Image: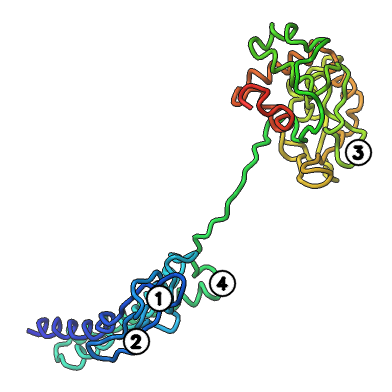
Amino acid sequence: MKKFFLYIFISIVLSGLFSPVFNVQASSTDPSEPCRFNQGDNGNNPATATNYPCEQYVLLSPFSTSLVNVDTAGPNALEKYLNLMIKIIIGLSAVLAMVMIFMGGIEYMTSEVISNKEHGKERIRNALFGLLLALGSYVLLNTINPDLLKTSLDIENVTLTVIDTANSVIVKTSGSCTPTPTGPCVPSSLYSTFGDSSTDASKICNVESGGQADRESSGDRCQNNPLLTFSYGLFQINLIAHGDKVIGTNGESCTNLFVQDNVQNTPIRRGRDYIVGNSPGPYSYSCKLNPEQGARLASCRDALKNPATNIAIATQLFRARTNPLFADWYLSDRNRCSGSVTGW
């Protein structure tokens, strides 16, 4: 019997608690003008919009002063609702805790059975613990950083540029994207290694070096030492990015010739750490020669100025990455060869 009256009491309390919600109405307004409402009354005639239908969502009986004119068509509308729900849930937790404390007190005072009194005290303790947990978590997060209590779904667009294995990221502004007319880069000479792509390979060779086997790059140079270049030969093979594929004239590998331009002489991870986006131009290279590697650099440079060696390494790069074709030259040469090289 006591449980029956208890359930009736809970129903009365909850119906009284949520009855104001039934008077909350919303209307939408024309986007060109704000909503206009009549006064209404507190009875069966609540305030209504006089220029319905509309687009703006307006709570006429807000839960708090912060629930005012939420524009569902505006930016971050869902974010605003979620932020309000956090406050509403905290408020409901406090109200429900007070209800449980009241019920525990009634049970404690009206029962003469010891076990029921203990149950009432336990209910009060649990309600206080729940209230402390809800309010304490909010206060703690707000003290650490108020932004932790805010939900933001406004994700900025991010542009990614893949430069891991690019032969060069300095965009060419000169050079003719036509087949090399003479020398080792004519299409017929390249056919044995590049096959049906020999004409495209000849065009890239012309843009990179003009078909000159001893060409040293004018763009692939260390930022603070403009006399120190690291790309050589017909296809301007980059010793920083592809030194592991080059064997110098002295028979030694051409890896780790360069380090980052800092006091620690930090090693360069291929294609990443030495590329910076500052002047001069969209990109530049933060690098310097690894101490005591001058002789090895000269050996590697001479090897890349050998047409057969340079073409062999370019063929290796071409076969390793085919999407798009000649992917290692795409970033630097696409400005000159857009539409001229297959797939560009």
Q: Position of residue 125 (x, y in %)?
A: 31, 82
Up the image or down, 261 lies above or below 330; here it is below
Q: CA distance from mark 3 to mark 4?
A: 47 Å
- Determine whether, in the image, residue 236 is placed left or right of residue 322: right
- Where does label 1 land, which residue? 134
Which amino acid is tagged 1? Ala
Residue pictured at 30% horizontal, 89% vertical: 40
User: How packed is label 2: few (under 14 Cα within 10 Å), some, or many (20 or more)?
Assistant: few
Q: Position of residue 43 (x, y in %)?
A: 24, 90
- Determine whether, in the image, residue 286 is placed left or right of residue 4: right
Q: Residue furthest left?
A: 1
- Where does label 4 land, which residue? 144
Q: Position of residue 304 (x, y in %)?
A: 83, 18
Q: Quadrant of residue 73?
A: bottom left
User: How packed is label 1: few (under 14 Cα within 10 Å), some, or many (20 or more)?
Assistant: some
Which amino acid is tagged 3? Asn
